[in-house]
């Protein structure tokens, strides 16, 4: 079948726009990568190049020599994974109830979830600090995880409520008619259909915790417990002057886990959430 | 009910995972939060902590890495929560609120006479709030002109020295002379225009903040305050001898253009020499010149780096003893070399290592005696005045959007309204 020239031009414009958008999105990461491999003299060039003329690993060496990056990364990983798992474990049953129970209380809870997202960090940090101090959870990764879970929970809940509502209630009713109990219905029918949503929510919680800076800065005192975003600021000096090469090298390493996690789970997120759920 | 029980169980479990209470036996442990960030500086600090720990079995110091970009918020939260480090590295212009808030220990009776007498009174003034001294000023840097030496030599202009600096008028004339063919005599990196302008204005007798007999501070933009802003404005808008594009840039942002031969000079902090050494193309000949002088000579304002002791620290004597160790003349020189800055201590400043021609250390060291407390050092409400009034006003003036009269009116009228709120 032949396509008309106007249609072909339209499609070309769409692809051009899409490629332009992808380049726009990828620019910061590619530039970070380029800077990470540039020697100091190339960083001061008036005509910067995409590809380093004399690529070097010196920035990576210096970054690792100066700061405990691997240790900080393992702290970040522990905090982010724990926060993601706990947040999803707590949010999933709550979301199910809120989605299925159309009561005034459920609606109020949904509203509160949205409102709670509006609180800025600085508003809560001092009361939170005092509460955690009384619980003797200052300067501890469990304390930080608890904060991350509390911080991620409202949005996780909000996301999951949407996913639960997208699961047709008729499927659960059909399972009940077929004799499945409440628990069996949840485990065998609802949970598999919710899986992509749960993965997406966990990913959101993971990335939020992985990138979080302010709570980690304030709550963790011992150098061995600091997370990666906090350690990255150690490459920045007075008046915003930065040790650019090592900072770029460390920041590049810091982005890798998020990219890897995305690469692993993105198919699960995008793979048709309800594919095959309803017979047509 | 079951949910509540679960939450309580989780909290107990998490609480159980944390470290237990403090142990009163054994040596005293002090936490020293350092903001050192350059490789050599971090190394110097860590080495000094190691040397202290090797010779003091009863008082151990734990090195904690902080960062300049977040130190204020981090300290504020730590103070509020009673978890501040014992020894605190910061800058003097960040101390006022902490000192007045009762978070920092008064060091007047804690420091040894040796240290007190070694640091000049003008430096102590930067950390004196009310009747107390709340930090030891130990490193400072003047703003200097970093120049393309080849360009300057070729042009035949008089090269200024600390003994014979350029006047502001001469500086304007020379930048005009150096300008042409798309190149500029100077590039002002004025992303933060207020502190740069105010600190350099001291040379022309600018004071801006005037404290009355009742102790209250008011803003008056007088003749001495006009010299530096007018010079910058005229270079950008009248002579076109200053690049208009760098007005919104930070110091580092101007370096590629400087190395690329686009600007003859860039006014920068003395410590920027490290970046220049690292990044300048091979064979690039640069030199440090003193900032221009006015009616008050080479005077300029600075906010030194400081070491303070937390009021809540149970070991203030030991913390002061560690500060004394860290700031012994030889150690102060090590810290200064690591940060590419000038020490405040008289003995350290006399060290031959800081008088070398290499990297123009000698030029900067010669400026040390002219450094004064930054004009806004102890003005309460300065931060808000700077952000809400002065920064936009200076930015608009430098870009040519408003004239000097409008700048004066905004700094004084709007500024005094802001300051008044803090001085009721």
Image (cartoon, rainbow, N blue to C red):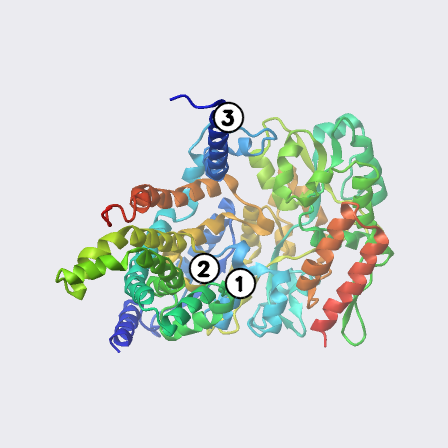
Give above or below for A34 relative to B308. above
- Please name the residue shown 42% across and 48% down the image: A67
Which element is circle 2 on?
Answer: helix
- Please name the residue shown 33% across and 59% down the image: A165
**Along the line of sight, which residue is nearer the eye, B343 or B196?**
B196
Q: Which disc, if any, is residue A24?
A: none
Give above or below for B352 relative to B5. above
**Chain under label 1?**
B
The label nearer to you, 2 versus 3, is: 3
- Residue A230 found in image quarter: bottom left
**Along the line of sight, which residue is nearer the eye, A202 or B62?**
A202
Q: To which residue does mark 1 refer?
A: B73
Q: Is residue B311 shown left or right of residue A150? A: right
Residue B357 percent across, percent down from the top left: 65, 37
Q: Are marks 1 and 2 in contact (CB under 8 Å)?
A: yes
Q: To which residue does mark 3 refer?
A: A6
Q: To which residue does mark 2 refer?
A: A217
Which element is circle 3 on?
Answer: helix
- What residue occupies the far left of the structure in this picture? A179
**Cα–Cα gap, marks 1 and 3:** 58 Å
Residue A120 percent across, percent down from the top left: 51, 64
The mark that comes first in sequence, 2 or 3, is 3
Badge 3 crowding class, 10 Å Cα cut-off, few under 14, some 14 to 19, many 20 or more, is few
**Along the line of sight, which residue is nearer the eye, A1 or A207?**
A1
């Amino acid at each position: 079948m032949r396509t008309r020239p106007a249609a072909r031009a339209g499609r070309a414009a769409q692809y051009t726009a899409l490629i332009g958008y992808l380049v726009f999105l990828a620019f910061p990461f590619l530039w970070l990568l380029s800077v990470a491999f540039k020697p100091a003299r190339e960083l001061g060039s008036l005509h910067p190049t995409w590809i380093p003329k004399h690529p070097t690993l010196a920035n990576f060496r210096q970054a690792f020599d100066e700061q405990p990056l691997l240790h900080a990364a393992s702290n970040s990983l522990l905090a982010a994974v724990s926060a993601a798992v706990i947040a999803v474990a707590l949010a999933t049953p709550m979301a199910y109830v809120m989605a299925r129970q159309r009561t005034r209380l459920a609606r109020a809870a949904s509203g509160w979830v949205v409102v709670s997202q509006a609180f800025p960090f600085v508003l809560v940090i001092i009361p939170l600090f005092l509460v955690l101090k009384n619980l003797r959870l200052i300067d501890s990764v469990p304390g930080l995880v608890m904060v991350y879970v509390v911080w991620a929970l409202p949005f996780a809940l909000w996301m999951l409520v949407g996913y639960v509502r997208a699961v047709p209630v008729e499927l659960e009713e059909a399972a009940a008619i077929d004799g499945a109990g409440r628990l069996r219905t949840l485990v065998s029918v609802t949970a598999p259909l919710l899986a992509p949503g749960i993965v997406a929510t966990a990913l959101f919680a993971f990335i939020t915790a992985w990138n979080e800076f302010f709570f980690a800065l304030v709550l963790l005192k011992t150098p061995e417990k600091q997370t990666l975003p906090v350690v990255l600021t150690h490459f920045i000096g007075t008046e915003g002057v930065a040790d650019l090469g090592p900072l770029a090298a460390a920041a590049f390493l810091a982005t890798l886990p998020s990219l890897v996690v995305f690469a692993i789970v993105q198919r699960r997120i995008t793979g048709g959430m309800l594919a095959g759920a309803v017979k047509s | 009910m079951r949910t509540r029980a679960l939450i309580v169980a989780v909290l107990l479990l998490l609480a159980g995972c944390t470290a237990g209470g403090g142990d009163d036996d054994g040596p005293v442990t002090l936490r020293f939060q350092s903001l050192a960030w350059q490789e050599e500086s971090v190394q110097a600090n860590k080495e000094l902590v190691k040397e202290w720990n090797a010779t003091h079995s009863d008082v151990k110091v734990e090195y904690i890495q902080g960062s300049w970009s977040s130190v204020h918020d981090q300290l504020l939260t730590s103070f509020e929560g009673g978890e501040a480090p014992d020894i605190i590295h910061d800058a003097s212009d960040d101390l006022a609120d902490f000192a007045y808030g009762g978070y920092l220990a008064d060091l007047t009776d804690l420091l040894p006479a040796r240290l007190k007498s070694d640091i000049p009174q003008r430096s102590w003034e930067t950390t004196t709030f009310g009747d107390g001294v709340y930090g030891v000023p130990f490193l400072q840097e003047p703003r200097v002109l970093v120049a393309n030496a080849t360009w300057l030599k070729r042009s035949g202009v008089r090269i200024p020295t600390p003994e014979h600096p350029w006047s502001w008028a001469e500086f304007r004339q020379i930048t005009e002379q150096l300008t042409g063919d798309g190149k500029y005599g100077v590039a002002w990196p004025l992303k933060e225009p207020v502190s740069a302008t105010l600190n350099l204005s001291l040379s022309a007798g600018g004071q801006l903040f005037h404290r009355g007999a009742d102790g209250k501070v008011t803003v008056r933009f007088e003749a001495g305050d006009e010299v530096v802003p007018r010079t910058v404005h005229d270079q950008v808008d009248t002579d076109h001898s200053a690049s208009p594009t760098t007005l919104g840039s930070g110091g580092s942002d101007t370096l590629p253009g400087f190395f690329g031969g686009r600007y003859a000079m860039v006014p920068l902090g003395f410590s920027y020499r490290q970046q220049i050494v690292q990044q300048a193309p091979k064979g690039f000949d640069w030199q440090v010149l003193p900032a221009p002088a006015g009616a008050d000579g080479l005077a300029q304002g600075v906010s030194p780096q400081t070491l303070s002791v937390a009021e809540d620290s149970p070991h203030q004597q030991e913390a002061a003893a560690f500060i004394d160790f860290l700031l012994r003349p030889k150690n102060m020189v090590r810290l200064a070399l690591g940060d590419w800055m000038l020490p405040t201590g008289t003995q350290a400043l006399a060290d031959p290592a800081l008088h070398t021609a290499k990297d123009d250390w000698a030029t900067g060291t010669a400026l040390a005696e002219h450094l004064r407390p930054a004009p806004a050092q102890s003005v309460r409400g300065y931060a808000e005045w700077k952000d809400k009034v002065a920064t936009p006003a200076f930015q608009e003036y430098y870009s040519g959007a408003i004239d000097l009269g409008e700048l004066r009116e905004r700094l004084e009228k709007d500024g005094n309204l802001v300051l008044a709120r803090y001085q009721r």
